[in-house]
Amino acid sequence: MRIAIVGAGLGGLATAAKLVEKHIIDIYEKESVLGGRALTMERIEENYRKLIAKFEMANAFAYPSLDEIYGNEYKIDLGFHLIGGGKRGACVKALKEINASVDFIGSRLGYIGDKIDYPMLSSLDKLKMLPRIIQLMTSRKKTIEEMKKMSMEEAIDKYGKGKLKTVLKIFPRLITTVNDLGKISAGETFFAQRELMGGHPVVYPVGGLKSISKAFASYIQKNGGNIFLEHEVKNVDIDDGSVVGIDGKEYDAVILNMPVQHIFKVVKEKHFENSWVKKIKSLYGTGSMVSYHVLNEIDKKLLGKSFVFLEKNDGFVGNELAGMIDFKMASQHGLLSPKKKYIVQSYVICTPEEARNKRKWDELAEAIDKSMEKLMPDYKKHVEWSIYNAIWHLDGVAKTIDNEKPSVATPIKNLYIAGDSVNSKGIGINCAIDSARLIEEKLKKLKSK
Ligand SMILES: Cc1cc2nc3c(=O)[nH]c(=O)nc-3n(C[C@H](O)[C@H](O)[C@H](O)COP(=O)(O)OP(=O)(O)OC[C@H]3O[C@@H](n4cnc5c(N)ncnc54)[C@H](O)[C@@H]3O)c2cc1C
């Protein structure tokens, strides 16, 4: 088949890598760089504000001002990024399938409570929780299906005691980027946990996120696929309910890689049933505040580690803010921090509405700062610069009970969706990359018919 992929985000690139040996692949990317939201910048350029705005983000705070930070030779991504699931996550698996040589720094998770626990769970904690965890992890699929309708709030009332309660409060929030436990499905959470058992729970690619897009792109090009940068697709051509091409060029199939709510910019709504358009437009994503702190001194014990926190705050949906502080970029092994400078990346979850609301920004930044202070009480003395960005489209579609993620197949024949909006496994990067597997399955079925 001749296949056009619209967007060179990780979803589009992973799908191209899966299909390129059997099909003719053209990828069209409107920006001049690969990776979409998984973008690594070589330095903070003067167009920084404009660039992040393209990805539904705004700079909330910068110390000193952005004008003074511009030009700094630090490689940073669009914002905090860690990839879940280590070796079992879709990202690491997909790169292994193409023999890509991307290294990852992995770690366990620590907890910033009244005191710092690293790892979060001691052997004794695990032993105490073991019977309950085994019961939950080994639940039959049917039980998990039933639990999908149960909210995490109910599950915590039922199972949450002692430290297990804290784990049950944090984990679902991290795997959905949603603070409201009433909206997170217990089945989904336990299913995700089961998938991710073993290995490092979180990893970060050496050299930044662009190592991932580069690896996919090089595999695609080596196998004859084309990537056209700075090429915005304006229209998907459809005839009688089937895809016929894009912008007048013929293709047998088209794969759209943008967040699903944006697909109507390139496919006219009239080609779908009203109910489908309405459903897709109603789907909501997730939000956060992300920050980078560059320190000139650091507690070396923190390097390479990642810590989660929960901050009580009744002013936000869910009443608690969950977040993470990560020191993998700070590790010299990460190849991102210049010598004797340490980049610390953090994020705190909020709803997309809260992320857009400037009045909420102070409290979100405070939640990050408080946790930084608990880890390194004198960190403020060592800050060279820091930036805080609000983002209201972190994940394409939030994984919640009331927000059913769509299939990779659309109602139009041979029109597919790749990326983090669809009902694939995992969250964020893993979800985007795993969508490639689902599209490949659909295309195989199509052929065998
Ligand atoms: C600040 C921030 C922090 C995050 N943190 C994490 C994290 O810690 N862990 C995690 O797993 N995930 C995280 N995510 C989410 C993760 O980055 C995304 O889930 C993932 O990168 C999405 O990939 P995608 O392929 O679905 O979409 P995108 O990356 O959005 O790619 C879509 C591409 O399509 C292109 N495009 C759109 N329209 C057109 C057109 N008409 N023509 C041509 N090209 C077009 C866009 O330019 C873009 O390159 C974070 C996201 C952000 C923004």
Image (cartoon, rainbow, N blue to C red):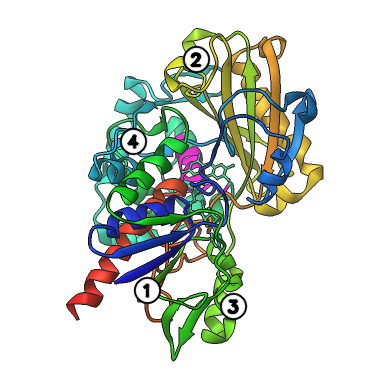
Bin the neighbour count of mark 1 within 10 Å (Cα to Cα): few under 14, some 14-19, many 20 and up: many
Q: Considering depth in this image, is 246 or 153 the residue closer to the camera?
A: 246
**Residue lying furthest bottom in this view?**
240
Mark 3 or 1 closer to N-term?
1
Residue 302: which disc?
Answer: 2
Q: Which residues are magenta?
A: 167-178
Which mark is in front, 4 or 1?
1
Residue located 28% across and 43% down the image: 93
Residue occupying image coordinates x 35% and y 44%: 218
Position of residue 435 measured from the top left corner of the image (x, y, whole percent): 37, 58
Q: Is residue 82 left or right of residue 340?
A: left
Please give the label number shown on residue 278: 3
Identify the amino acid type marked 3. Lys
Labels 2 and 1 touching (C-beta < 8 A):
no
State the image coordinates of residue 276 (x, y, percent, origin top left): 52, 80
Report whether 52 appears left or right of 427.
Answer: right
Image position, residue 234 (x, y; %): 58, 70
Residue topped by disc 1: 253
Q: CA distance from mark 2 to mark 1?
A: 48 Å
Q: Between disc 3 and disc 2, whose residue precedes?
A: 3
For marks 2 and 4, give the CA distance.
20 Å
The kind of residue on which mark 2 rests is Leu
Q: Pick whichever of labels 2 and 4 is earlier in the sequence.
A: 4
Residue bearing mark 4:
86
